Image (cartoon, helix red, strand yellow):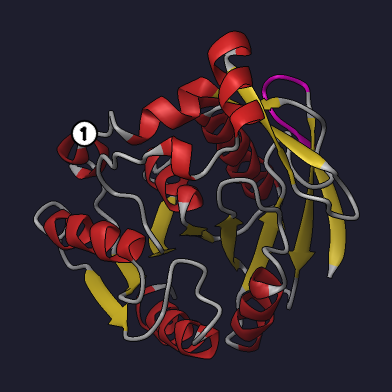
Amino acid sequence: MIKVEFENSRGLNLVGNLYSVDSDLIIIFSHGWISNKDSKGRFTLLAKALNNCGYDILTFDFSGCGESDNDICTTEKRIDDLKSAIKFIKSKGYKKIALYGHSFGSYISLLSYNKDISAIALSGALTDSMNYNWEEYLDENQLNDLNNKGYFIENVNEIQRKSVVVDNSMLLDFQSINQEKLLKNITCPVIIIHGDNDDEEVQLCKRSKNAMNYLKNSDIVVIHGENHSFINHYDKLVEIITKWFLKHFK
């Protein structure tokens, strides 16, 4: 694994890890909400498993996360970051590009799709509008900041970063997703993987099942006993994703 750096269109520096086995096929990972390119070790495990299948992997920190430059996180900025990662990878001469996204990273992957993308794998996927009660997720100070400043700060206490700043618009975006508009132009094969062990995954899975109406030649898999973090049966997730890419990305 080697550390790489590239700029987004806004001139901010993004930091990534390139796991290379000298392949001409590469998969770009997009992390979740306020996570980072390692995703608590999960992305590292999956990257190495996919290396063993013959794929190069790029994981990277969205702006405002991990080691990348500071920024206030918004959906539009994350789309720009992923498109910048795709541009960076294309400049390296890879033959084909695929995407993998977890949680909010799945939504960004779908929004960033273009004809250069050959396959997409998603876990804990956000494919349609969700109405979260943010009072259950944010403390009183965060809610006050959200109302008064238009953003809130989430402490992450990582080695690289102590906090992530999230714009109010990201919260509003959850409830404004139009599934048909999001998915209707995606023509590459897609696999969506969910758990069934918490209400969030149950609700997300319900929406992803409906997404199959728009995603032709695609698959949905449910890992029983798994929740949104995918820490209980991560080995199963790795197995499903590696086998699927070997079939659909070559």
Against 208, is 152 above or below? above
Q: Which residues are magenta?
A: 6-11
Q: Is residue 235 left or right of residue 1?
A: left
Tell me where residue 59 appears, x and y as whole percent. Answer: 68, 58
Q: Is residue 99 magenta?
A: no
Tell me where residue 167 appears, x and y as whole percent. Answer: 58, 23
Task: Give me the residue at 49% from left, 59% from top.
Answer: 102
Task: Give me the residue at 51% from left, 44% from top.
Answer: 137
Q: Quadrant of residue 8?
A: top right
Question: What's the residue type where badge 1 is placed?
Answer: Asn
Residue 167 in sight in this render: yes
Q: Which one is in front, 244 or 177?
A: 177
Principal secondary structure, stretch drawn in magenta: loop
Task: Give me the residue at 46% from left, 89% from top.
Answer: 236
Q: Which one is in front, 53 or 61?
A: 61
Q: Which residue is mark 1?
A: 178
- Could you classify mark 1 by the number of other residues whose Cα lies within 10 Å: few (under 14), some (14-19), or many (20 or more)? few
Q: Which one is in front, 187 or 101?
A: 101
Q: Quadrant of the N terminus?
A: bottom right
Task: Give me the residue at 78% from left, 26% from top.
Answer: 12
Tell me where residue 2 appears, x and y as whole percent. Answer: 87, 64
Against 46, is 53 above or below? below
Q: Is residue 207 left or right of residue 105?
A: left
Q: Is residue 72 left or right of residue 220?
A: right
Q: Quadrant of residue 245?
A: bottom left
User: Residue extending furthest front?
Assistant: 140
